[in-house]
Image (tube, grey):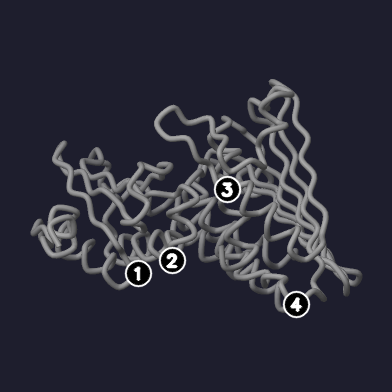
Amino acid sequence: MKKSIADLMKIRDEALKNMQLRDQSESNCRVVVGMGTCGISAGARPVLRAIIDEINKRSLNNVQVVQTGCVGMCRFEPMFDVNINDEKVTYVNMTSEKARQVVVEHIVNKRVIRDYTIGKSENE
Amino acid sequence: MRDISMHVLDIAMNSIKANATVIKIMIIESDETIRLIIKDNGCGMDKETLNSVVDPFFTTRKTRNVGLGIPLLYQNVKRTSGKFNITSSLKLGTAIEAIFNRKHIDCIPLGDINETIISLILLEPLIDFIYTRKNSFKKYVLNTKKIKRVLNGVKINEKEVIDWLKADLLNFSMAF
């Protein structure tokens, strides 16, 4: 355990150095993951982890990930919203693979993946 | 819910909603049982609410009239002829205790509890989590309050810190 804490201190010092280098622009992108009972039992946890992992991998510092409860559309879970500049897109029936695609296509490349959105699923 | 770790995430979400600032999660294993305790210092519940939490047709939500989190846990515990207990007092917080009979054929597995703990820390970095895992040989405690003290302003949900937490959790769960 002692050695482990020493490692943590090293990480802290490293992070403090990086923090000054990082650009401090305000976050303009918010991802809201449904984490109610329905979401969790449908597999929201791996989806959430995939989103955060992909964001970290690409150092997307201005993306904020938050949770919300059940929004009443349990049959579409796992689902999450991507809000960029107050424009909301809801992605439904997510898996960790699909979630990674959404991060890359929507958040990085700014192209909505229509096939995964709620509008598409509802018409089927 | 496929495993106990999912229930832990779900029940902890209730604590978050109750504006808890400290959430204690304990998993105590023996040969016969898995004991799960989740305790928070959130807003708590009054007697009437407390008596109806295991009823699936009770919920605090105004929009719908079902709430399944606690009923599902209750059901999974009772299926193993285990014990379920919930206590709460207004403004002080709530505690849930669930004892699964692990020898029972219907007992769901523990699941990836480390992932649940990491997910909670990622989602709510400002809340303090005290996670204890214990069996008759070993005890592991992760207290985010202590870790934040070491971090001295660096966020606990920074990628590198999360990687460290993951390694630390994994290191100890190998011994279980």
Q: What is the spatial separation of the Cα atoms under label 3 and label 1, in whole angstroms? A: 23 Å
What residue is pinned by disc 4?
B105
Secondary structure, mark 3, is helix
Position of the N terminus of chain B by quadrant: bottom right
Residue at 57% across, 60% down: B6
Are circles 2 and 1 on residues that touch, CB within 8 Å? yes
Whether labels 2 and 1 belong to a single chain: the reply is: yes
Q: Chain of mark 1?
A: A
The residue that mark 1 highlights is A96
**Same-subunit check for callouts 4 and 2:** no
Q: Kindly check if marks 4 and 1 are in contact, taking CB atoms under 8 A apart as contact.
A: no
Tell me the kind of residue under disc 4. Answer: Ile
Asked if residue A11 is positioned above or below residue B96 in the image, the reply reads below
Comparing B47 with B138, the one in front is: B47
Mark 3 crowd level (few <14, some 14–19, many ≥20, 10 Å Cα): many
Q: Whole-Å distance between the Cαs marked 2 and 1?
A: 6 Å
Label total for image: 4
Tell whether B22 sits left or right of B159: right
Other-residue count near label 2 (Cα within 10 Å), few / some / many at <14 / 14–19 / ≥20: many
SS at mark 2?
helix
Q: Classify B77 as above or below A82.
A: below
**Is the Cβ of the residue at disc 3 closer than 8 Å to that at disc 2?**
no
Q: Position of residue A53 (x, y in %)?
A: 37, 65
Closer to viewer: mark 3 or mark 1: 3
**Residue under pointer 2:** A46
Task: Using the numbered discs, state the Cα–Cα distance from disc 4 to disc 3 in whole angstroms.
Answer: 22 Å
Q: Circle 4 — which element?
A: loop
Query: Sequence-wise, which precedes: disc 4 or disc 3?
Result: 3
Q: Position of residue A21 (x, y in %)?
A: 30, 51
